[in-house]
Amino acid sequence: MSGLEQTRTGAMRPGTADPGRMRLGDGANPFSDSSKSFHFYPSPSHRKGVHRITRGLRSGCGLILLIGEIGIGKTTLARHIQSTCRREYAFAELANPYLTPNEQLHFLCSRFRVGTDGLASTDDYVQALSRCFARLVEQGRPPVVVLDESHLLDRAHFGLLLILSNLRHKGRPLVQILLVGQVELLKRLAEPGLEAMNQRIGVRCELAPLSREDTGRYIEFKLRKAGHEGRSPFTDRAVRRIWDISGGLPRLINHACSHALDHAGFSRKSRITPDCIERVYRDPLYSGLFRIRTRPDRTGRRRMFMLAAAGVLLLVGVAVFLVVHQGLLFQERTNAVSRNAVRMVPAPVPVAEDAAARPSAEPGLGGQDSVTLSEPVEVVEPGLSSGSQSVRTDIGSRMDEPADFDGDSDGTTGNGLFAEPAPDSPVAALSVAAVAWDENPDKRMAIINGTILHAGDSILGIRLQAIEPDGLVLEHGGILYERRMPANEGQ
């Protein structure tokens, strides 16, 4: 009979289901862990595991590894393989990792029906099993030892497994070993001294949790195997919530569905909603059950990777900050140097009044009135050597000590290079507030009438011809004028 059949008392028992009269929670629980209701759900990950393990057995690879989280279905898959391949292989499952190596050998002898009388040492057990294994190979049913919870084995157990894996028959392993355990088994095999064991593993499989879609199909699969027909009592939103709290682990899915069915049957409900799943999730009796995930290695590596990435980003940020900070410091120092090069220029003294107030120092030269001269000053054009292409001027008077001037009618000075601006001329009326001189001509500037000017700029029809270390050269009406600045100002 299949399904759930209603008894005379109204309870449901295994039999033909009556969807119209079925009550949730009656009859056998489709999600129980009973061996009598064992059913293997072939998710994509589990199908791949079955395929790889059976292919490894048939190719005689010797050592096979199956790992996964707690409750993901490792034991179920191993037993499914034993069930479907029992005609091809002689299986012996060893599920107690706490037995000593000799106790494990004794257990294997009992499973393979090997007499243990007179066997005492490890070598005695191995020799007896070796003869049994050879007979099984000759009969066409090679032996396979399945060790569940292998991550709990110690180094002595791994040493025994290495001895068994060394047994050969006609160039092939005399016995094949399937190691089933949690993901920690990979760390154990990576320990020093287990390199030979680790290298001999020919097939490695890791089971993945169910997806949300597979979770819904898994629930329907379990209901059908229990005889339920018709629409699933679990709503789509309830299935999604089950997947959320279980993480896709079949054992936790079974817990959630089983308790939800019990609650719905007690409450006489025909549908299981997200509220039912939430009530199970928050029940103190199951506190922490649905929060257990056993992927410490992968989670740890992911966190380490994220921390390492954050560290790299932090270092890059610090490096960028230092570069920007140093650049700002350099710019600030450059600006400070530029500010130090700026010297304030006092207001010009009318030349005519100063010339009238002071007598001539020397008689006129060449029929011209005399001027007061200081030591000659060399003015070198940028890019020209002072020895070969310098131009020596005889303009020695400074703005605070203007030279007596009584020039020609064309306004030029005695040396004939620059003219002295007339008191009422636009050149004399210019207000020079500051001058900044730099070796780089592009960085030289002057503040005239409140405007920053560079060489070549014009203001009020007057062109700033050049900016020299101690003065300005101005051009107006085709005539060059010089405005000198005192050397002792702004230092």
Image (cartoon, rainbow, N blue to C red):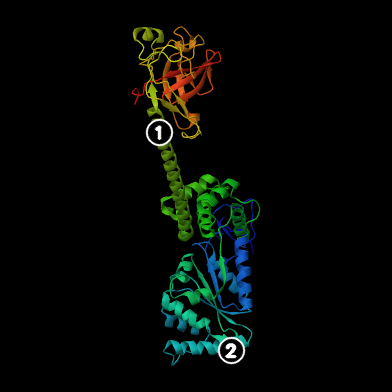
Task: Say which of marks 2 and 1 sits in front.
Answer: 1
Numbered marks: total: 2
Q: Residue at x 42, y 76 (%)?
A: 155
Q: Quadrant of residue 354?
A: top left
The percent position of residue 201, horizontal first and vertical second, equals: 54, 74
Which one is nearer the viewer's eye here, 388 or 333?
A: 388
Can residue 362 be seen here? yes
Q: Residues within 10 Å of mark 2 (few under 14, many from 20)?
A: some
Residue with the mark numbered 2:
135
The percent position of residue 442, horizontal first and vertical second, equals: 50, 29
Picture layout, residue 105 above or below residue 472: below
Residue with the mark numbered 1:
332
Q: Quadrant of the N terminus?
A: bottom right
Horizontal side, residue 25 vs residue 122: left or right: right
**Distance CA(mark 2)–CA(mark 1):** 90 Å
Q: Which residue ends up furthest to the bottom in the rendered image?
A: 118
Dot 1: element: helix
Q: Quadrant of residue 56?
A: bottom right
Which one is nearer the viewer's eye here, 425 or 375?
A: 375
Q: Indicate which disc, 2 or 1, sits on the residue closer to the N terminus.
A: 2
Picture layout, residue 152 above or below residue 7: below
Can residue 114 be seen here? no
The percent position of residue 337, horizontal first and vertical second, equals: 39, 32
Amino acid marked by disc 2: Arg
The percent position of residue 404, horizontal first and vertical second, equals: 39, 12
